[in-house]
Amino acid sequence: MKPIYNRVMLKLSGEMLAGTDRFGIQPAAIHRFAEEVKSVRDLGIEVTCVIGGGNIFRGLAGASKGMDRAHADYMGMLATVINALALQDALESIGVPTRVMSAIQMDKIAEPYIRRRAERHLEKDRVVIFGAGTGNPYFSTDTAAALRAAEIHADVILKCTKVDGVYDKDPMKHDDAVRFDRLSYLEALQRGLKVMDTTAISLCMENDIPIVVFDFNVSGNVARVVCGEAIGTRVDNG
């Protein structure tokens, strides 16, 4: 297989790290993700990752129960750093050098995010994991992935999900849901499709960064996507 991208951003929800559990980090789930990342890196691709924190704490959920939204979002950012460190450990246990870079300064456990330093790590064949979102409340990890992808000039955002693409309605609830092979950014925004949040999609549209949404639960799908196989749904300028 020959890759069609040089530098990719992998976006994974925190819930996927919980595996079959409702909360926390399931070792089998995070080690499987590490193996998928390694398979892509072994193709000579520069890999970056952003992981959500919903398996530990979700800011919106906390805010909906009466917590101050900014306070809840900061707690969610800390959860993403926990997940980033867990992924770092899983990757390094299989021989993949990594760096965790945090948007919130915490020098004892992660490097501060500096764009040029992140690019230098990638040039040295290290996987870079971005933690703590954008460092600001009211922004999701989807937006963080789009922002970092734009800053480091990633070729594509690979949105790892539990379904095989983007549908016109929830395929878990509707048997007649129709999957899209390709969408434009504007169509995704106008239809209100759950590709990424609107801020993230807008950032990708402005910077011409395609998004590929695909089923992460099928082993080897990440490598197939980066090698150009028509898997999932591609969102771009059309």
Image (cartoon, rainbow, N blue to C red):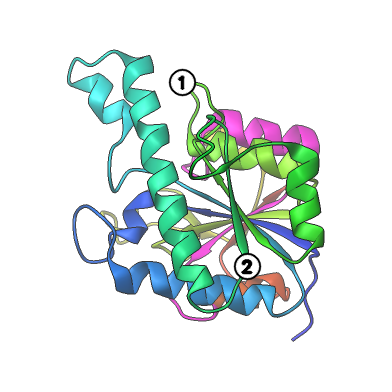
x, y percent for residue 202 = 66, 31
Residue at x-position 73% and y-position 47%: 118
Left/right placement of residue 80 relative to residue 146 reads: left
Residue pointed to by mark 2:
97
- Please give the label number shown on residue 138: 1
* Residue 17 percent across, percent down from the top left: 35, 60
* Image quadrant in which you'd find residue 233: bottom right
Q: Residue furthest bottom?
A: 1
* Left or right of residue 90, residue 183 in this image: right
Q: Nearer the viewer, residue 152 or 196?
A: 152
Q: Is residue 204 above or below residue 27?
A: above
In the rendered image, which quarter is residue 61 located in? top left
Q: Position of residue 71 (x, y in %)?
A: 33, 18
Camera-nearest residue between 237 and 84: 84
Image point (51%, 69%), residue name: 91
64 up-or-down from 130: above or below: above
Q: Quadrant of residue 1?
A: bottom right
Which mark's residue is nearer the viewer, 2 or 1? 2
Mark 2 lies on a secondary structure that is loop
**Residue neighbourhood size for the residue with mark 1, other residues' Cα within 10 Å, grouped as few (<14), some (14–19), many (≥20):** some
> Is disc 2 in contact with disc 1, using a CB cutoff of under 8 Å?
no
Q: Separation of disc 2 and disc 1 at Cα?
A: 32 Å
> Residue 75, position in %: x, y?
34, 29
Residue 46's disc number: none
Who's the residue at 77% across and 75% down the image?
A: 44
Span colored in magenta? 193-220
